[in-house]
Image (spheres, helix red, strand yellow):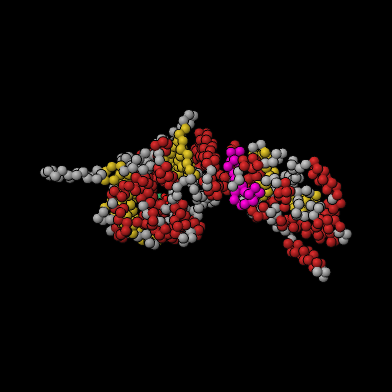
Amino acid sequence: MTADVKKETMGFQTEAKQLLHLMIHSLYSNREIFLRELISNASDAIDKLRFAALSNEALLEGQGDYQVQVDVDKDARTITIADNGIGMNRDEVVEHLGTIAKSGTAAFMESLTGDQQKDSQLIGQFGVGFYSAFIVADRVEVHTRKAGEDADQGVVWESHGESEFSVEPRDKATRGTSIMLFLKDDCEEFADDFRVRSVIKKYSDHISVPVMMLKPAAPVAEDAEEQTEQPPEYEAVNEATALWTRSRTEISDDEYNEFYKHVSHDFDEPLTWSHNKVEGKFDYTSLLYIPKRAPFDMWNRDMARGLKLYVQRTFIMDDAEQFLPLYLRFVKGVVDSNDLPLNVSREILQQDAAVESMRSALTKRVLDMLSKLAKKGGDDYAGFWKEFGQVLKEGPAEDFANKEKIAGLLRFSSTHTDAPEQDQSLEDYVQRMQEDQEKIFYVVAENFNTAKNSPHLEVFRKKGIEVLLLCDRVDDWLMNHLQEFDGKAFQDVARGALDLAADTEEEKAEQEKLQKESEALVERMTKVLEGKVAEVRATARLTDSPACLVVGEFDMGAQMRRIMEAAGQPVPDSKPILEINPGHPLLEMLDQEQDEDQFAELSAIVFDQANLAEGGQLDDPAAYVSRLNKLLLTLSGR
Ligand SMILES: Nc1ncnc2c1ncn2[C@@H]1O[C@H](COP(=O)(O)OP(=O)(O)OP(=O)(O)O)[C@@H](O)[C@H]1O
């Protein structure tokens, strides 16, 4: 049987085809990155073998020197990247090189705009990987064989990067993967030894395995009588020590940046990083990065998250999620422990006391790194907040111990600026607090405008007291877990009775008078609104609006109630309190109304409007419209 008979041609998965096409076009101006991607994959494959060999030495086939070898052939216009890593069997080749296994790929494809510049950033963030070979090559041949298997289990995968690829068996004596790129006409620079060396140096210096290239031939002496054939000699082109093991002072920003791209598969540079060696009870090194941009799948529950775990410089696993809490899931990097056993598994990590203590130290590190970024000023922290603020807001609920620290990192919009940008810190707020103000006030609403124009703010605006304007979905939940900051309690302005310490004695007396005078009105309204409200009471918190709704001190906030209802969750049955502004002409009119039916109608309108003003939904909107229409008609006397 000839090899041809076993050759099979297959089609790329639709998403893979789209990605290939887009990548070739949008990344062309940055095409040298294909080398970084292929060397990064080769190094990952070696890491995987090194780990597998810990429990099965036979996989090494007696050859434990790991390396990546890069060969160029100017005449044939090819470049070959070969590794002696884990390799792939036939099924793996088809799966890994013919499909994209990442969850959310289809949604990602839909988010592409067709605008080259924007798309190239998105694609970078998605991770370009193996397919980047087709930016420079019009034909790619992958010859691979899984470590530990026989030579006749070798496979060749080949494609022109259009819609199809083929696979066929071919013997391979050595384990690992060799990728040969047949370069496009205008990419022959990548068959040039000097050019390739400089690209490797630039992108792959930090890779811990040596990347070998043929040593330039020594000049042959003219009087040499007979030229003897020397076996080709290879030399390492990169530094080949794991970057995090080197001392901070020796590492340049460029090297940190490139290493980030290797561990994160991000195309962009990181926002900041923190590199630390810890000695003492536990010995470990960590290198943690904050990305500039949120990954496309940050809200996907199955997104890959966590750090790359090494034990004594041996790669153990990707996405070790036990080292950081969920609300810091955007952090990328490496942790290398000297204490954990080499055969550590995910299950062991979950129960290990050393891991627990590393997790709390690493969490502090990240929070400190963010505080530093925030203190530095400039746009960096604002950029961070825009991308990851929503995730950080999950923090106080998840991480009780660091609540105060996280609170210091939060940013809000507030009546101080009245703008939707979330750029005010609690520290700023506290500094601006009035002399006898004891609480930090906030309002939560569906959206920014509803928050900003909330009737609950009227008295605060009048008195010049700042209120935080919250309108993100997580906000009600966040505030349930944030009781205080800097010793000052938080107070929802739409919850419970309003007690402003800033009120003067005169104002307090005035309020009491108001309560007394409106007793009759309150009683009448309570009667006609029975079943709809828990209570009706007069308030001094309104200046322009006739009424507003307030939730009881211990009841669920209105926003939380709406979210839970939308999610089909049962919500406890609690009724709002209607607070009225007796000085408002509408209420004065109501007070004068003798006709009890008319009084009931008007009261119902006041109640429904208070609900609408805070972004609520009416129980019976049609009844509201009909009441209002009846009222409008009386205007024209019909
Ligand atoms: N040199 C190699 N040796 C062994 N397996 C490889 C090699 N190169 C690629 N693979 C396999 O193919 C898969 C797909 O590679 P690809 O580079 O497209 O994506 P990735 O490395 O998983 O992530 P990213 O797209 O973010 O780089 C890899 O996960 C790996 O399983």
Q: Position of residue 212 (x, y in %)?
A: 30, 44
Q: Nearer the viewer, residue 289 or 459?
A: 459
Position in image of residue 554 (x %, y %): 72, 44
Question: Residue at the spot x=75%, y=45% of the render?
Answer: 498
Can you tell which quarter of the image residue 501 is in?
top right
Report the residue at 53% width, 43% height from top: 377
- Is 604 placed above or below 149 here? below
Does the magenta run of residues contain 419? yes
Residue at the image point whose x is 64% and y is 40% from the top:
431
Q: Which residue is the extreme one toward the bottom?
A: 638
Write down the region rendered in magenta.
403-422
The image quadrant where one finds the C terminus is bottom right
Q: Going by the picture, which residue comes out furthest to the top?
A: 280
Residue located at (49% from left, 48% from top): 292
**Left or right of residue 434: residue 216:** left
Is residue 47 rendered magenta in the image? no
Q: Is residue 5 left or right of residue 615?
A: left
Q: Is residue 451 left or right of residue 605?
A: left
Residue 166 visible: no
**Residue 148: x percent and y percent?**
34, 45
Q: Nearer the viewer, residue 94 or 357?
A: 357
Residue 229 x %, y %: 17, 45
* Number of marks drawn: 0
Which is nearer the eye, 269 or 533? 269
Q: Is residue 480 above or below residue 583?
A: above
Do we see residue 241 in this rendering? yes
Q: Quadrant of the N terminus?
A: bottom left
Q: Nearer the viewer, residue 242 or 448?
A: 448
Q: Quadrant of residue 17?
A: bottom left
